[in-house]
Image (cartoon, grey):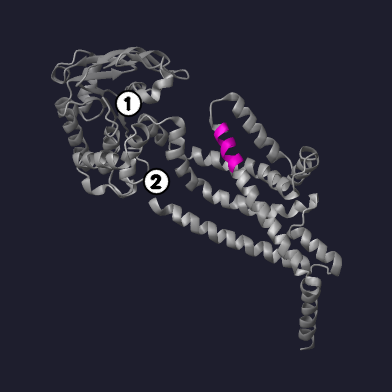
Amino acid sequence: MIKVVDLYKSFGDLEVLKGINNEINKGEVVCVIGPSGSGKSTFLRCLNMLEEPTGGEVYIDGIPLTEHKKDINKLRQKVGMVFQQFNLFPHMTVMDNITLAPIKLKGLSREEAREKAVTLLRKVGLADKDYEYPNKLSGGQKQRVAIARALAMDPEIMLFDEPTSALDPEMVGEVLNVMKQLAEDGMTMVVVTHEMGFAREVSNRILFMDDGIIEEENSPEELFSNPKSERTRSFLSKVL
Amino acid sequence: MDVFLRIIAKLSDEIYFNLIRENRYMHFVKGLGVSLQLTFFAALIGGVIGLFVALARLTNNKVLNAVASKYVDIIRGTPVVVQLLIIYFAVFASTELPRTTVASIAFGINSGAYVAELIRAGIQAVDKGQMEAARSLGLSYAQSMYHIIIPQAIKNILPGMGNEVISLWKETAIAGFIGLEDLMRGAEIVRGRTFSNYTPYLVIALIYFYITVMMTAMLGKMERRMRKSD
């Protein structure tokens, strides 16, 4: 579904991604772990062209993204994204946050979009919050709304950029539960995370990134209990 | 007591000669109309120019960028009265446009440069994540600007915009340079008739002041309404 070939990304003189190759298949849940500054987020942001690669190519359903910049808005509809800082639209109610894109881009009527939003809000456990403004919500609630907003576009794949890193500890669980549910429903997911428990429990595959490359990848069981690379081992010993 | 009476007598004389006799108050009333009209249309024109110039400065298009920033530099680098005279006597010299229109355009072009900077700063102050979230949903740059960024930027821009309209209101006092009978000019005309030293100026000072107070109150109301979702 997503294929990454020889991906490079530099910011000025700083080379952040140094040749990434990977393929993410339909229905897979892939967690990306690694130390800060290893390029995890940049890698994720290249998958929907929020960062433009300096080299290599990202294919979504076989379509090379850098060659189809004109269609990028259309292609992005297939790829939902959830951010560390939630990035809800503060001037709109929860309902409008969720319905804006489906109305403008999918041509849904207001009623259809609302119906769908209500279903999604129920799914993330916030059925009663539809007419609140984001600033009235807790961090965990904001992030669940952000997930519902992304899902409203019926994406084929969901990208999560450290979705629980900005949350108070007691709110991490509610967000992870929603994500777990999503994974069980068969959504294809790429999750950059520091939640090792979640990675271990939910993912099919883990990518360990260090210094701009994928240092090691494996099933969670193998990677956590039997890391092959020295750097993986040293990282895991610090976080587990 | 004597002094007091003399002041009253002098004051009523001044009022009579500067406002009542020969319906001279009409110069002020008409002048107020002209000044308000200029401010209104100049603010409108300035707002539209400002928005487009701000957007031009924010794009990656080098030509648009250069044109927009030159415009801002030139307007901010020259006195508004000089701009008004050049626009009236050079740019629109051969047209039949009414003076109020020309002056509105001139003040609008001037105000646009300041408004552009306000809007640009207001847009840049909106968190970067907002644009990213909008784009990640598949909205185009223009849709994201229209639905997400600009509504939030307005909240940042509004206080500065209020200041801009208030300065514009007072800047229009130079409209007399191209023969418009605005408030300022109205005072000059009355003064020419009555030879009062300063009474007509006091009258227009009061008018300028109270209109400004009213504008400030209106802006305060708008700002409070905008804060609804905070």
In the rendered image, residues at marks 2 and 1 fall on the same chain: yes
Q: Residue at x 27, y 23 (%)?
A: A34
Residue A123 quadrant: top left
Say what secondary structure mark 2 lies in: loop
Answer whether residue B89 is magenta in the image: no
Does residue B142 appear to the left or right of A2 in the view shown? right
> Label 2 sits on what residue type?
His
Q: Which quarter of the figure is the N terminus of chain B placed in?
A: bottom right
Does residue B202 appear to the left or right of A15 in the view shown? right
The circle on residue A36 is 1
Say what secondary structure mark 1 lies in: loop
Q: Mostly what secondary structure, the magenta segment? A: helix
Q: Give the range drawn in magenta.
A: B48-56
Chain at numbered mark 2: A
Observer able to see residue A167: no
Q: Is residue A133 above or below residue B181?
A: above
- Asked whether A163 or A76 is in front, the reply is A76
Q: Can you name the residue that lies furthest to the bottom here?
A: B1
Q: Is residue B163 above or below residue A232?
A: below
Q: Which residue is drawn at 29% across and 47% down?
A: A137
> Label 1 sits on what residue type?
Ser
Tell me which label, 2 or 1, sits earlier in the chain.
Answer: 1
Neighbor class of circle 2 (other Cα within 10 Å; few <14, some 14-19, many 20+) is many
| Residue that badge 2 annotates | A91
- Asked whether A203 or A178 is in front, the reply is A178
Q: Residue at x 35, y 23 (%)?
A: A75
- Asked whether B178 or A211 is in front, the reply is B178
Q: In this view, does B91 lie above or below A93?
A: above
